[in-house]
Image: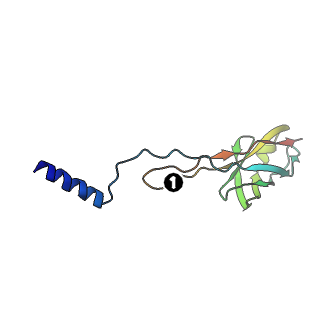
Amino acid sequence: MKITAILLLTLLCAACGYKSPTTAAAPQPGTTPTISQLSPDSASSGTSGFMLTVNGSSFASNASVSFNGAAMQTTFVSGSQIMAAIPASAIATPATVAVTVTNPGTMAMGPYGGGTLSETSAAVNFTIN
């Protein structure tokens, strides 16, 4: 009787599509953006804020620009151009600062997780005179 019950339970589980749980899939690398040009590529210290145009490739629609390590308000134009609002406070003193673009990671929905990792471009220097 026990063997019959076990066989019936096994058949019922198989018929219902039951699968044993698996481990969550590890996030995969995302697409790394590349910066080819900043416009402008310099500014005078103590002047008013401005819009920085970042040209390059592989920009996600939700990519963000970091200016001297701080995330800026970013507007997506296309996969090869984004714009960032740089406030006057970010260019108050002379310096050379790094500009980067980050494509955020994604979280895959479903029972096994996954998604992509965030990826950041190589830094490009911006000069504050």
Measured as percent of width and height from the top left, residue 79 is found at 73, 59
The residue lying furthest to the left in this view is: 1
Measured as percent of width and height from the top left, residue 11 is found at 24, 57
Please identify the quadrant where the C terminus is shown.
top right
Q: Which residue is mark 1?
A: 108
Q: Nearer the viewer, residue 98 or 117?
A: 117
Residue occupying the point 20% across, 53% down: 7
Q: Nearer the viewer, residue 79 or 8?
A: 8
Q: Is residue 2 left or right of residue 49?
A: left
Residue occupying the point 43% across, 44% down: 23
Count neighbours of disc 1 (C-alpha within 10 A) and say few if under 14, some if 14 to 19, many if 20 or more.
few
Q: How was the colour assigned to the protein in this rendering?
A: rainbow
Quadrant location of residue 122?
Answer: top right
Judging from the image, what secondary structure is the residue with disc 1 in? loop
Q: Is residue 92 above or below residue 86?
A: above
Residue occupying the point 68% across, 53% down: 63
Measured as percent of width and height from the top left, residue 75 is found at 71, 59
The residue lying furthest to the top in this view is: 95
Measured as percent of width and height from the top left, residue 100 is found at 74, 45
Q: Amino acid at mark 1?
A: Ala
Residue occupying the point 83% across, 38% down: 96
Count of numbered circles on the image? 1
